């Protein structure tokens, strides 16, 4: 068995691990929003103002810090005025991207209700592709202008919310290089400057404007955006607080065609090798950003990421409904560790998507909801929220590879919370082999250990057995000299607490 030495520099706290890195994404797509989250006030499914109670609880329990809405591709086809005011009078539409009828039952006020119920901060994505500067600046004013300050503030009050909502997080379009308008970066960069200029800061709501960023390794997009929008303007005004990055791991490449649940060791290696590229892409885009913004004022917002497999047999292909196995949970832990290690640049991220679509936290079927093993990883990582990242050295784990692409057998990240507790999250990325680890964490001692373990990486929860795979308390490492020794089973995620 490989023996790994891990050293956590508990006395060398680094940048803050923003809780927003553990964010989620709700799009009007397939059964994510309607059904997966929204059932309506009159539904027999227990709900909080129309939002299913089991979903609200699942999001509260992991401390979901933000929810990105209404898309995705849907955002650049969405007109916010269609979703406010009495529901009976709202227009019905057809989603240009996903083809579904859009009743506009859920609009801005309903979405804010979901955020209030879950404790998540709203992260709204404005329409650049088919919308106007005026439409988006009006949405900001509608939500953030002080009560009575303008006709839009009055309209908000007439729709039931007198006080401003103070929505801070705004994305200026989505994937403007594809579904958001098939734009070239130079054109989008100029559009971004125009849009961002008119998105005003209102009292108590200084905006965090997120520019559409690249996909994967499109470094030229980042270069153009940072050159055009990454520096303060004359007078010191900053137009862009973050640049987005989208990266999905798709075994076999787009369109997703490989089963989420039936896979072997080579498929596992492929997914982990693809996940390793998140590190490469963050480092590559960060290096470009560093040249234009050495102070790291502009964040990288990985506002769509996840493992994307073929839809479950018998489900509509455009709904992107897939199961979530332990493989996806390990992939999620590995990705979150990568974000933590890049905390100085990555300050927001959104797993795609919350319910029933792509890499989901939970799946629903009528009144039933099952939490995927990925949900457990977000529960295990909650201790990292707003803690200070700590340097971690690992030695001896070795590497694995798929088609010449290497990935480490172990992924590790650590942070120190305000109360001094240190959390170390460890993913054994090996399909079949355990790792013997010994951890040094200064003079601190292990006080707790939880983990996600399963007999097989294909294991997952079903509606018949919704808790087949769950994170639980695991054997606490034993002292061995100045270190703490334990064994990490293959395909596992472990969280150790030191005090
Ligand atoms: O998450 C599904 C889709 O993937 C989103 O709508 C889009 O932004 C991305 O291409």
Image (cartoon, rainbow, N blue to C red):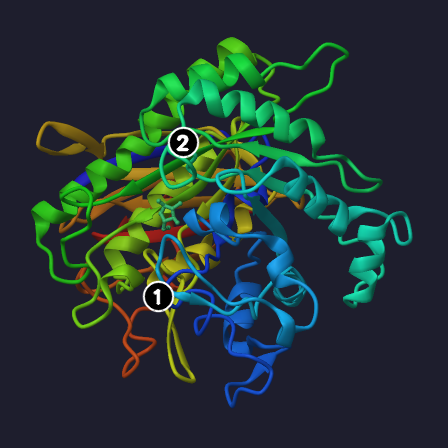
Tell me if the residue at label 1 has its CB under 8 Å from ligand 1.
no
Residue in the image at 82% along x and 42% along y: 204
Q: Which residue is mark 2?
A: 7
Residue at which label 1 appears:
372
The CA distance from mark 1 to mark 2 is 31 Å
Q: Residue furthest right?
A: 148
Q: Is residue 238 left or right of residue 163?
A: left
Helix, strand or loop at disc 2? strand
Q: Position of residue 440 (x, y in %)?
A: 42, 36
Where residue 409 sits, quadrant-wise, is top left
Q: In this orientation, does residue 249 appear?
A: yes
Q: Establish if 390 lies above or below 54.
A: above
Label 1 CA crowd tier, 10 Å (few <14, some 14–19, many 20+) = many
- Which quadrant does the N terminus fall into? top left
Q: Residue furthest bottom?
A: 44
Pick whichever of labels 1 and 2 is earlier in the sequence: 2
- In screen coordinates, is 447 left or right of 207? left
Residue 445 appears in view: no
Q: Nearer the viewer, mark 1 or mark 2?
A: 1
Residue sitting at x 42%, y 51%: 495
Secondary structure beneath dot 1 equals: loop
| Residue 151 x/y as whole percent | 84, 51
């Amino acid at each position: 068995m490989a023996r790994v030495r891990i050293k956590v520099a508990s006395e060398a706290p680094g940048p803050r691990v923003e809780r927003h890195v553990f964010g989620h994404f709700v799009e009007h797509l397939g059964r994510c929003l309607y059904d997966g989250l929204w059932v309506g006030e009159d539904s027999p499914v227990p709900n909080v103002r129309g939002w299913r109670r089991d979903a609200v609880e699942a999001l509260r329990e992991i401390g979901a810090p933000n929810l990105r809405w209404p898309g995705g591709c849907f955002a650049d086809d969405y007109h916010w005025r269609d979703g406010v005011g009495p529901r009976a009078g709202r227009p019905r539409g057809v989603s240009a991207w996903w083809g579904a009828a859009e009743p506009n039952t859920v609009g801005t006020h309903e979405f804010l209700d979901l955020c209030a119920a879950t404790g998540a901060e709203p992260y709204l994505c404005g329409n650049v592709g088919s919308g106007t500067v005026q439409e988006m600046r009006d949405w900001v004013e509608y939500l953030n202008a002080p009560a009575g300050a303008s006709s839009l503030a009055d309209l908000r009050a007439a729709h039931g919310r007198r006080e401003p909502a103070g929505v801070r997080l705004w994305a200026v379009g989505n994937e403007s290089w594809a579904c958001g308008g098939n734009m070239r970066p130079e054109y989008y960069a100029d559009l971004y400057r125009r849009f961002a200029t008119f998105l005003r800061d209102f009292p108590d709501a200084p905006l965090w404007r997120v520019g559409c960023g690249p996909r994967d390794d499109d470094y030229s997009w980042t270069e153009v955006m940072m050159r055009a929008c990454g520096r303060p303007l004359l007078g010191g005004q900053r137009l862009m607080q973050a640049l987005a990055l989208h990266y999905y791991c798709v075994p076999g490449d787009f369109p997703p065609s490989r089963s989420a649940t039936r896979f072997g060791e080579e498929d596992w290696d492929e997914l982990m090798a693809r996940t390793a590229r998140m590190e490469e892409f963050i480092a590559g885009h960060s290096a470009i950003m560093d040249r234009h913004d050495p102070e790291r004022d502009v964040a990288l917002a990985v506002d769509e990421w996840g493992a994307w497999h073929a839809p479950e047999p018998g489900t509509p292909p455009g709904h992107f409904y897939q199961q979530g196995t332990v493989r996806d949970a390990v992939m999620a832990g590995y990705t979150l560790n990568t974000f933590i290690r890049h905390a100085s640049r990555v300050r927001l991220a959104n797993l795609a998507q919350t319910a029933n679509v792509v890499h989901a936290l939970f799946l629903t079927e009528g009144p039933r909801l099952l939490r995927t093993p990925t949900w457990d990883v977000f529960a295990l990582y909650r201790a990292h929220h707003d803690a200070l990242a700590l340097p971690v050295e690992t030695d001896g784990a070795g590497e694995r590879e798929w088609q010449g692409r290497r990935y480490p057998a172990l992924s590790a990240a650590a942070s120190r919370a305000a109360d001094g507790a240190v959390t170390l999250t460890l993913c054994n990325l090996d399909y079949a082999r355990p790792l013997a680890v010994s951890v040094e964490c200064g003079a601190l001692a292990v006080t707790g250990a939880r983990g996600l373990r399963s007999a097989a990486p294909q294991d997952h929860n079903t509606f018949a057995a919704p808790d087949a795979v769950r994170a639980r308390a695991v054997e606490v490492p034993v002292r061995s000299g100045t270190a703490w020794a334990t064994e990490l089973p293959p395909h596992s995620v472990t969280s150790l607490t030191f005090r």
